[in-house]
Image (spheres, helix red, strand yellow):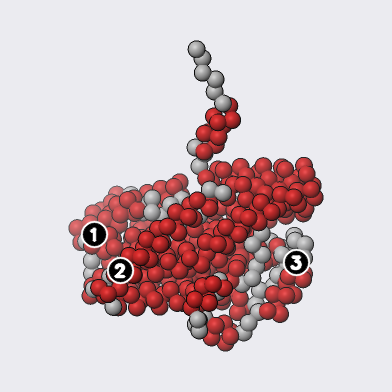
Amino acid sequence: MSTSRNPLADLWRKWSSVPLWLKILTGMLLGIATGVAMGESAEYLKPIGSLFVNTIKMLIVPLVFCSLIVGVTSMQDTQKMGRIGLKSFVFYLGTTSIAITIGLALGYLLEPGAGVQMAGSVEAGANLAKEAPSLADTLVNMIPTNPIAALAQGKILQVIVFAVALGIALVLIGDHGKPAIKLFESLAEAMYKLTDMVMNLAPYGVFALMAWVAGKYGLDVLLPLLKVIIAVYLGCALHIFGFYSLVLAGLSRISPVHFFRTISEAMAVAYTMSSSAGTLPASMKCAKKLGVNKSISSFVLPLGTTINMDGTALYQGVCALFVAQLFGIDLTWVQYLTIIVTATLASIGTAGVPGAGLVMLTLVLTTVGLPLEGVALVAGIDRVLDMARTVVNVSGDLVATTVVAHSEGEMGEATEVEAEAEAARV
């Protein structure tokens, strides 16, 4: 007796086994085709996309708050470890701010979103310009008078400042803070899982939003995406081989050429896997080849996978300018500074989250009042961008590990001799 099979069930099983990035890309392409076919009737699909955008917005405050506290409290305040943690922390935040500045500069110079304006862009730009606060107001408003109100109202900068301060306080009170830290670690894990659940909806949300965009505005709005890819890849190359080379030359005794030759394996794994955490074993292996003491690499590298987001920050800068230009919105220099501060501080807690790039982009756009419809456009090419920005993140982790090890005198002499011999053979 033959058993009949359900072709729809088989199709669903095959679809479920497809990687998320490929699902999102498929959703984008199908959305474009559907929008072109339906024309302005694709407006009926917009609510589905809006639901997806709302679910991402729902995640932002609790995810950033819990993740920041966990990121800050992960550094143990014990003499050498505390000193190493502080050096790593400052290094990661400093390079992240440089990365997003490079991204903003490239977005400003290359203008990936110029030439195409969405409906209502003139009015949106005028409203945003009138609402833009001064630098003094921005600095004063960073400190919440009521942290609970800041959480409820989604005031991201205030949430970030309060979370960092609370995390530092929990570390300083020692054993008394451990129960609270455990609670936030549990909540953070729950938020990571919820983020994973929401990101599984991304293909359908992107499909609906892309159908609406293509139907209402035509294919011209999609052409600037190629310029976004070029700008991000160019920025990543400048940050890795330009900025990191200068850092290595100035703060360590390893030549940049030898350094990048040695970590090429980790860079290749990062590009194919698009995961800093997944590349960690290869990074540890490369750190050993560089001569970094294991006591340093075993702390600084995992910390980097949590708080170092140089590549993602650079991507935020390019994409924020892309969205602003697409909607015809002129940002003030205060808003540029706000983007730098927001992306830099948010990098403490969201690097290890699935879909971190899109979540952080939503956070940055929300902070300066840019339209979130731009997220759908970027989501379709996010995988291509993710590959490049993960290489930057992993390279930054290894640069930080090398610099910190050099400052602590923890570079293995035997390994350096072997490295020099290997370089001479090459």
Specify the farthest residue to the front.
Answer: 1
Q: Is disc 3 surrounded by few (<14), some (14 to 19) or many (20+) residues within 10 Å?
A: some
Residue 385, x across and y down, in percent = 54, 53
Can you tell which mark lies on residue 121? 3
Q: What amino acid type should be assigned to the residue bearing mark 3?
A: Ser
Q: Nearer the viewer, mark 2 or mark 1?
A: 2
The residue to which callout 1 is attached is: 294
The answer to whether one can see residue 407 in this image is no
Badges 2 and 1: C-beta atoms under 8 Å apart? no
Q: Is disc 1 surrounded by few (<14), some (14 to 19) or many (20+) residues within 10 Å?
A: some
Residue at 70% x, 70% y: name it: 329
Q: Quadrant of residue 414?
A: bottom left
Q: What amino acid type should be assigned to the residue bearing mark 1?
A: Lys
Q: Nearer the viewer, mark 3 or mark 1?
A: 3
Position of 51 compared to 65: left or right? right
Whole-number angstrom distance, CA of label 3 to CA of label 2: 49 Å
Residue at 55% x, 31% y: name it: 9
Residue at 49% x, 37% y: name it: 17
Local secondary structure at mark 1 = helix
Local secondary structure at mark 3 = helix
Residue 400, x across and y down, in percent = 36, 65
The answer to whether one can see residue 323 in this image is yes
Q: Nearer the viewer, mark 3 or mark 2?
A: 2
Whole-number angstrom distance, CA of label 2 to CA of label 1: 30 Å
Badges 3 and 2: C-beta atoms under 8 Å apart? no
Q: Is disc 2 surrounded by few (<14), some (14 to 19) or many (20+) residues within 10 Å?
A: few
Can you tell which mark lies on residue 179? 2
Position of 407 compared to 313: left or right? left
Can you tell which mark lies on residue 87? none
